[in-house]
Image: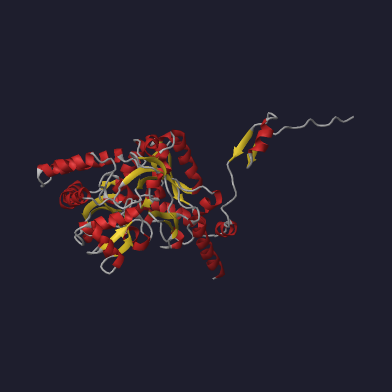
Amino acid sequence: MTQPAPSQAPAAVAAVGADMFAAAVEAQAVPVERVDWKPPMDGTVDDLATVAADPLRRDANQLAVKRMLDVQAMLVGVAPASELLGLEKGQFLHAGPPIEWARTSGPLRGALMGAAAFEGLVEDPEDAVALFEAGTEVTLEPCHHRGAVGPMAGVVSPSMWMFVLEDPATGRRTYCSLNEGLGKVLRYGAYSTEVLTRLRWMRDSLGPLLAEAVTAAGPIDATAILGQMLQMGDEAHNRNRAGTLMLMRDLAPHLARSSRPAEEVAEAFAFVGGNDHFFLNVAMPACKLALDAARDIEGSTMVVAMARNGTDFGIQVSGTGDQWFTGPAQLADGLFLGDYGPDDANPDIGDSAITETAGIGGFAMAAAPAIVRFVGGTVPDALATSRRMREITIGENDRWPIPVLDFAGAATGIDVSSVCRTGILPQINTGMAGKQAGVGQVGAGLVTPPAEIFPAALAALAERTRARSEA
């Protein structure tokens, strides 16, 4: 008589969704691998299928990443915005996607008011409100539209001095204003006398001094410094201590030999030495320079800009040109200064998310575990975040290795289709500005973009794909 074959228990079971099934299987002594999976974002299934079938997508994305990684960002100069960007009196740049005065947030209004007084358009910053409401003598334009980036409010006016980053292979350039430090500063919407006094000193002393030193030093390799920062505990968004020190190492001999008075040089050393975020304003245009190289590649689903103006959060995608996809800026979750709390904070603001777009900042939190003491969370959270970001990116940047992840390169190239397929949103480390104009910084924390902007970008990509297939 034939005996029945013994039952074969599975070696392991993969469980997706509700935990009840996984627990029941485990109770029968069967190993279970829980898979963190959920359906694609609502309404994206058809567009995901269309974009996935696009014959251009794979090569386009690989080209976008390659172009980005081929860029070597060199600090080559410091000069006024009027000279570099052609800004004239009454013209102001700001962070994030386009916005009109009526919709501006408190910190952006405060920064514009302070900048108007700094430029001599008004005596009292409070008088600038009527100037911007009339709109006849002033214009507003995103920094990104002029090849620039600005942290927080990101306001740039003609007299402000800016860092110049250049890719020697192509000659392309990007720009960013000088960093003012923390607390009550223009970029956080403050416009008190001390803020304006500091801006005038930066215009009259610090800017010319740095310009002389950078010229004497010759091009400074910002891309290489970014790589070294990740080895030294920075993530290049909310922690820039190592980057600032390395920049000063390169500039110090030339500052010391400057033609400027010794007291001015000492004051500059003291200012930069007391401002751990000084290098952020070099890191940002370095990231933009790399990402701009990946723009305008038909079929590419790679995000080339994430930016916020305090009201809207916008992204731009390689395969859709200069089009912005926007949604409401979100409130960050984090730690507050002094007696400030969530009710005091403005929604997320600034162009500094260009760092996360390039694969550092919140994407590289594993490289900077100390950052959790500034933005909240735990060290395991930081490690998990850097691993999770790899699920929504196209490749990795071997020039920016993360030691604790066995020197894996930073996750690179946010993929719109991967975000929509997984529901995982990019993680951003950010500062928090007070929602009332004039307050300044109130805290720092973690934030993600509004989810709806990624399906909107995916739909535009799918429409282009269908149009090409029908042509």
Residue in front for this viewpoint, 280 or 400: 280
**Is residue 174 in view from this perspective?**
no
- The image quadrant that residue 273 belongs to is top left
The x, y position of residue 136, in whole percent, is 27, 69
Along the line of sight, the residue nearer the viewer: 267 or 200: 200
Residue at 16% x, 51% y: name it.
Answer: 208
What colour-coding does the image apply? secondary structure
Q: Is residue 118 left or right of residue 290?
A: left
Residue 119 drawn at (x, y percent): 20, 59
* Residue 6 seen anywhere in this rendered image of the structure: yes
- Measured from the top left, where is residue 422 in percent x and y? 55, 48
Q: Nearer the viewer, residue 37 or 401?
A: 37
Query: How many numbered circles are shown?
Result: 0
Answer with the quarter of the image where residue 47 lies: bottom right
Question: Is residue 330 left or right of 4 when viewed as pictured?
Answer: left
Question: Quadrant location of residue 226?
Answer: top left
Q: Is residue 411 above or below residue 13?
A: below
Name, please, the residue furthest toward the right: 1
- Can you say which quadrant of the picture contains the N terminus? top right
